[in-house]
Image (spheres, rainbow, N blue to C red):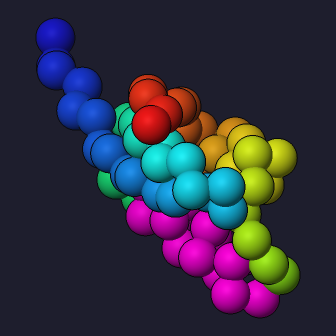
């Protein structure tokens, strides 16, 4: 049985909260990061709703917040 690796992404929301997310696939992690940055650059601050929408699209999960 193969071990599954987790790929991590840390991102800061508009309210200053740091969110650490985990992904089973590196391409999902990279896609999520690119999408979050594109949203921030083109449409405005990334809040909780935006994070959850993009995170769901790339099959990620929140691991911790601080």
User: Could you tell me residue 52's position as x and y percent?
Assistant: 73, 42
User: Could you tell me residue 24's position as x and y percent?
Assistant: 38, 36
Furthest-front residue in this view = 16
Q: Is residue 54 magenta?
A: no
Q: Is residue 35 magenta?
A: yes
Q: Nearer the viewer, residue 24 or 51?
A: 51
Q: Quadrant of the N terminus?
A: top left
User: Could you tell me residue 41's position as x and y percent?
Assistant: 68, 87
Q: Residue at x 82, y 47 (%)?
A: 49
Quarter where residue 4 is shown: top left
**What predominant SS class does the magenta segment belong to?**
helix
From what the image shows, is residue 2 above or below residue 9? above
**14 left or right, relative to 50:** left
What are the residue bounds of the magenta stretch? 28-42
Q: Nearer the viewer, residue 45 or 63?
A: 45
Instruction: Look at the image and tell me whether residue 42 can be seen.
Output: yes
Q: Residue at x 63, y 70 (%)?
A: 35
Q: Residue at x 38, y 51 (%)?
A: 9
Q: Residue at x 75, y 46 (%)?
A: 48
């Amino acid at each position: 049985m193969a071990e599954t690796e987790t790929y991590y992404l840390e991102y800061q929301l508009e309210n200053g909260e740091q969110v650490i997310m985990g992904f089973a696939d590196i391409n999902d992690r990279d896609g999520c990061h690119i999408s979050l940055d594109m949203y921030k650059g083109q449409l405005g601050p990334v809040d909780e709703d935006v994070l959850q929408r993009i995170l769901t699209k790339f099959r990620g999960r929140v691991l911790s917040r601080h």
